[in-house]
Image: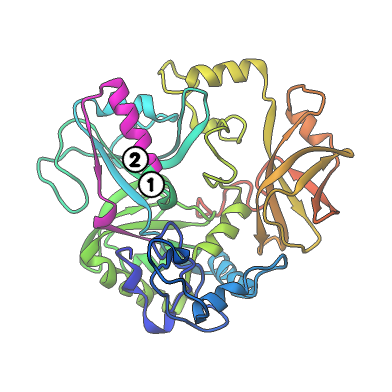
Amino acid sequence: PTPCTRSYSPEAVCSRSDRAGSGQAGLSPPPQGTAPVLQYDYYGAYGNRAHRDHAYGRLLGDEYTFDFPPHHDVIKKECLACRGAAAVFNMSYFGKFYLVGLDARKAADWLFSADVNRPPGSTVYTCMLNHRGGTESDLTVSRLAPSSQASALAPAFEGDGYYLAVGGAVAQHNWAHIRTVLQDQKFRCQLIDGSEDLGLISIQGPASRAILQEVLDADLSNEAFPFSTHKLVRAAGHLVRAMRLSFVGELGWELHVPRPACVPVYQAVMTAGAKHGLVNAGYRAIDSLSIEKGYRHWHADLRPDDSPLEAGLAFTCKLKSAVPFLGRAALEKQRAEGLRRRLLCLTVDEKVPMFGLEAIWRNGQVVGHIRRADFGFAIDKTIAYGYIRDPNGGPVSLDFVKSGEYAVERMGETCPAQAHLKSPFDPDNKRVKGI
């Protein structure tokens, strides 16, 4: 269990549709009621007896459908609560690493596609690439101030230090990639794993500032606490690291909380949020909210064979600087030759579920397939992302994208689709900025 797994009150029981083996909540509460989660049975292998007929299995069995899931309306309520008021997400399953040491800055320059060498207190969204320019990870990197004393929120170090927050499902992949690069380049620095020592509570939505202003001893105004910054603050008397970030496209903050303080901090947040309409929400809501905003999911629409240029993440690459980084040469070559494929956002007016691997048609020709799809409740449409190519083998320019008529094939039937070059929800980022 994650540090915050047991933080939920009895009336806020969540369905643990296991994300990354951490028991991260899928939704809260499931419409069919609750059921005990049995020990993993390894499908009867390794001398274990397979579970035959049990309540949790029957509950999950209802999800095996090509229609919308039975808890579609539960996810909708969580998403619309986040858009209209606020939602709290337990993201404690995320990986949390520290990169410190004599060569930490050199390592950060080489590892991360974006320029993370901002002043302490800055947080940067970036990618890590391989030598082919493919994306091994997307993550946030926060610059730390040096300190001679270790704490629950940072190790003691001199010089440069960085705090990395990575998706929990790929934390081990990130760890292995970073360790390999550090060894190959012989950088003199340490990678420290703090994942089990910290919980992560994310409070997102237009009411998040009003809620957290009652819990944190800091000014949360745009001027005092801008987007993509972090501070050490006290939450209900406990020292935490607050980051103004969002993975759902709303005004919001992440609270990185020492393990012993997770329950009291969570309880303080829920108490303050009661009058503002704060709800518990799970990763099924995150999946919907994030695709609606156009945020990428590594492993689905972003993989080691996808470059950030193809994925619409050129802003994460410090190509305008002269700083070398892993994968830069491949990106420069790709940019010079033109992109042979490009990630495209499509919306479908017809209310049909999509799951990925559906064919994308452009002007009567198949040009790709869907990598990731979900339903966007704020725009009330199915949203899908997939990479498209030019059947003639040419570069996929923005003019190529805009000039086509699109459809998505679902179970043998085609649904007309609209292509978007920007997120269909809040394309100007006003909500994230608190405007």
Number of numbered discs overlaid on the protein picture = 2
Relative placement, left or right, of 165 versus 129 is: left
Camera sees residue 123: no
| Classed neighbour count for the residue bearing mark 1: other residues with Cα under 10 Å, few (<14), some (14–19), many (≥20) | many
Q: Quadrant of residue 105?
A: top left
Please state the horizontal and vertical placement of residue 397, each as a whole percent of the image: 73, 27
Q: What residue is shown at x 53% (from left), y 75% (from top)?
A: 57
| Magenta stretch bounds | 173-201
Q: Which residue is mark 1?
A: 171
Residue 331 in the image: above or below residue 211 = above
Looking at the image, the residue that sits furthest to the right is 364
For residue 175, which numbered disc appears in the image? 2
In the image, residue 334 lies in the stretch drawn in magenta: no
- Towards the viewer: 260 or 136: 136
How far is the residue under mark 2 from the one under mark 1?
6 Å
Residue 400 in the image: above or below residue 232 = above
Q: Secondary structure at mark 2?
A: helix
Please state the horizontal and vertical placement of residue 155, each as a whole percent of the image: 17, 44
Camera sees residue 168: yes
